[in-house]
Image: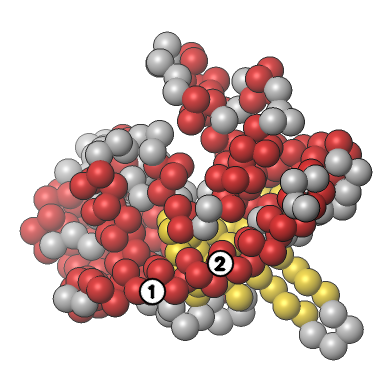
Amino acid sequence: MGIIVRFCYNPSIMQKILLSGVKPTGRSHIGNYFGAMKQWLSLQDEYQCYLFIADYHSLNFIQNADEMNKNILDLALDYLAIGLDPNKVTMFKQSDVSEHTELAWIFDTITTMPYLERAHAFKDAKAKNKEIVVGTFNYPMLMASDILLYSPDTVPVGQDQKQHVEITRDTAEKFNRIFNTETFNLPEPMILSEVAVVLGIDGQKMSKSYGNTISLFASDDEIQKQVMAIVTDSGSEIPKNVYAIHALIKPKEELDALYEANKGKYKILKDALVTDLIAFIAPMRERRKAFENDIENVKNILKMGGEKAKAVAGAKMEEVRRAIGVSL
């Protein structure tokens, strides 16, 4: 899920709300950090932030209790380790706010199967002849619920996520029309063209599914191994895949001078990237270790965040129940 921002205007103040959700599907990598997590850091002082762990979405991929539990805590630790402040960011588990799934069921009842067959995830699974579970088929309705419970007006997303906003808008409009209400506003997509696309060690987009990642909290030895595995072009004096990753953490002027002075010296350039990555990752890795030593505090942060989010979602859900006629 992308970043969701609501702008609320008031004669004297402007309140801005940001909400984002990410599936806990494995170790965070530097692509996650530069593609999204870093932005959250810069926005937590400017927005009222809601950041949720989309554990129910992950049931489409993870159906092992121990693995799910570990991934949830790992993702919470990652958020805290990069510097997100629980006093500024409401961090919670999707499963702790039952309104998400309640609203998804209501949306299911007004959504047709042919409409959901348009969804990219469904079409992709069908094209690959995968056995498609209902959760994959109707996940757009849960995603629409995730968004609409918090009444966003603007939804900044990457180009590949634009359909999520389109489906959410369609669903909001259809609900309002069927039940003759103005319960939901129609959020507008804001395409984030400046979001970094981080290349993996094979030159493709960095992704867990491709197995081409550099872990965000890797040990020094892991960083060394992963960097040395970066694919290079022997016909080029400057290894573009190495340079692309290096450019994420080092100023262009310094980087260009380094690569100019070491043209064709791939080992030297990879060693320099290892050194710079270790220096970049080390402080976050240390913060993560500190939170790991107080895991009950991490659980409490999620619990308190869930209570705060539930109050917001519950108020919107009561509007929905009144609109459909079940609130007596």
Mark pair 1, 2: CA separation:
12 Å
Hey, which residue is sitting farthest bottom in the picture?
12
Q: Out of 17 and 212, give the one closest to the viewer.
A: 17
Residue 30: give x, y in percent of width and height.
33, 57
Of the image marks 1 and 2, the number of the one nearer the N terminus: 1
Whether residue 117 can be seen here: yes
Residue found at x 60% / y 45%: 102
- Residue 205 is marked as none
Q: Residues within 10 Å of mark 2 (few under 14, many from 20)?
A: many
Residue found at x 17% / y 44%: 229
Dot 1: element: helix
Residue 280 appears in which quarter of the rendering? bottom left
Residue 176: give x, y in percent of width and height.
85, 44
Disc 1 vs disc 2: Cβ atoms closer than 8 Å? no
Q: Is residue 10 above or below residue 195?
A: below
Q: Amino acid at mark 2?
A: Ala
Dot 2: element: helix
How many marks the image carries: the answer is 2
- Residue 309 is marked as 2
Q: Residues within 10 Å of mark 1 (few under 14, many from 20)?
A: some
Residue 66: give x, y in percent of width and height.
21, 47
Query: Is residue 2 shown left or right of residue 322?
Result: left
Residue 109: give x, y in percent of width and height.
69, 30
Residue found at x 74% / y 31%: 110
Residue 166 appears in which quarter of the rendering? top right
Query: Is residue 280 shown left or right of residue 105?
Result: left
Hey, which residue is sitting farthest left in the picture?
221
Hey, which residue is sitting farthest front in the picture?
328
Q: Amino acid at mark 1?
A: Ile
Whether residue 243 can be seen here: no
Q: Which residue is mark 1?
A: 301
Query: Is residue 267 shown left or right of residue 99?
Result: left
